[in-house]
Each structure stands twice: as structure tokens, then as C-alpha cells.
Image (spheres, rainbow, N blue to C red):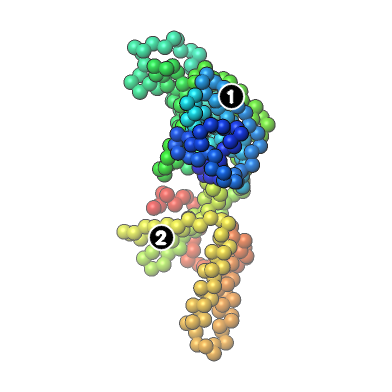
Amino acid sequence: MSDIGSGDEGISSQKYHGQSMDAGGNNFDSGQQPQEQELATKMLQIQSKRFYLDVKQNRRGRFIKVAEIGADGRRSQIFLAMSTAAEFRDHLSSFSDFYSSLGPPNPDNVPDDGKLKSEMMLKDNRRYYLDLKENSRGRFLRVSQTITRGGPRSQVALPAQGMIEFRDALTDLLDDFGTDDGGFKGELPEGRHLRVDNKNFYFDIGQNNRGIYMKVSEVKSNFRTAITVPEKCWTRFRDILADYCDKMCRAHQPADSHQTGASGAGLAGYAGGAGAGGAGGDQSAPLSSNIDTFTGSAPNRI
């Protein structure tokens, strides 16, 4: 997955010898050090195509990369989380049963778009479209992977006669490595809402293939914007904000005020409480009374 497998721009030249570029222009033999660890691989020869199924692992969890190499050397790939691979495996069984029930190809009965059966899978910010199609070269299963917020589409085309063989190879890998994607499994903190004058700020904690993040949205009647802060920098983000709060508090007070130290400590305590949702702050620190918890997701509000 471009998210899950973002560090896998380089495919081993020993495994994928030949041209160095795939159909989409990705450099497979760029010499970059892969960030993923390869746990297992299977190779299938189906008609004139080779398919590689690689189980990989990175800091976000495990996933399967499916690479297709055509007879002309053109390459394409898709990425499947382990749970998505299990769902795909089940779909392969139903598609194979449907394919077996079809009679011989009849050009007069082919739909205009060539689609005989279609399904869709959704995982985090990715959509997978499964289309059993027919054209002049025969019947095949096209698997397309897209990003819901736009971005490049990648796809592989599996000859219909090889669906069972592909399913069995996928099943072997899932039996060995399971269907758990890895990553955080606990309950994420509830969102919070802060109103200041005519502005509303929403703090939402979410999770996707890249990990856990905080989305901070500023909403007014005619204005809306948002930033996304990865969990790994929440503590640093909090510390920077607390430092600014402390400096501005001292700047607003007389230089000889005996309350300066106490005020700075109080703000630091508040900042620690504000970060407690996932940044390692003090869970017992008081929160501002005008910050409310809520249920629901930010996209429904903005």
C-alpha cells in the first residue's frame, strides 16, 4: 500500500530481473534500502504472467504485496493489509465459482463494459475494485487499488483460469502469518471541542495505515481548515506549545511578580493534561472547563 508499503520502492533485482521500471514509472531497482522486512514470498506462473506474493512487515504492521510481471516485462503492484488479503481470498472463491458457472465465451452476450461480476473492498483510506471481465483475449479478474482522497490508481490483472491457484497461494501465506494487520488495538480517546469567541476547534483522534494521528480543525461560519499531527510528535508538539504559554504568561506580568513561577508551573500542568489523550501527559491534570468531549467524527462536522 502506498501508505503501508511506502518504503518499498525497490524490488530485489534477483527476484524481478529485467527492466527497472514498472508501467506506472516506479523505480523497482532504485538501489534504495527497503524499510520493510520480507517475511515470505511465493511465485506463480499463470499463462504468460508471473505473480509474486510477498509478505512484508514494517513499523505499521504486516501486509502482502502482489506484483504482476507481464510477458513484455511490464510490472504493476497492489498492497493488501493482512485482513484485506483474507477478504480478497474469500472473494476469489466466489468469483471462481461464478466463473465455473459461465458457459463458453460468447461475444454476443458480453456487456458493453465487459464486466461479468464486480465487488468492492474498503480498508481505511483505500478502495479495491474487483471486476471479472471479458475481452477478445479471454476472461480475467482485474483488481484495482485507489486512494479515497485521490491519487494514482494501481491494478493487476489475473487470468480467470488462475484464480484458484492464486487463492490457494494466498491461503497458505495467511495460514502462516495470520490476518492480524498489527498496529494499535486499544480504544482511541474521545474527541474534544473548544470554543473561543466565534471560532470552534475540534480535536479528533484517528488511525489509518500510517498510524495514529490527531486532527485539529478550526471551524467558523465561512471558514474551515485543519492540520494533522502524527502521534509520534504529540509530546514535542505539546512541549513547544507549553513553552510558548509559559513565555507569554511571564511577558504579561511585571518583572518582579512573585507569581511568575507559579503561573508558569500552572500552564505547564495544563499542557500536560491537554496531552494526556495520547502524548504521555499527566492523566490527573485538570482540563479547561470550556473543553467538552463529544462522540462522532470530524468529517461529519466540517
Q: Secondary structure at mark 2?
A: strand
Q: Residue furthest left?
A: 222
Q: Quadrant of residue 11?
A: top right
**107 left or right of 211?**
left
Q: Which residue is mark 1?
A: 44
Where does residue 96 sit, x and y in percent of width and height? 52, 19
Looking at numbered disc 2 in the image, what kind of residue is underneath it?
Glu
Where does residue 269 sit, x and y in percent of width and height? 59, 71
Q: Residue at x 54, y 90 (%)?
A: 256
Where does residue 260 sit, x and y in percent of width and height? 56, 83
- Do we see residue 174 in this rendering? no
Dot 1: few (<14), some (14–19), or many (≥20) neighbours within 10 Å? some
Q: Secondary structure at mark 1?
A: strand
Dot 2: few (<14), some (14–19), or many (≥20) neighbours within 10 Å? some
Q: Which residue is mark 2?
A: 218
The foreground one among 186 and 19 is 19
Q: Residue at x 35, y 23 (%)?
A: 113
Q: CA distance from mark 2 to mark 1?
A: 51 Å
Q: Is residue 270 above or below residue 26?
A: below
- Do we see residue 247 in this rendering? yes
Please count the marks in the image.
Answer: 2
Q: Is residue 264 above or below residue 147?
A: below
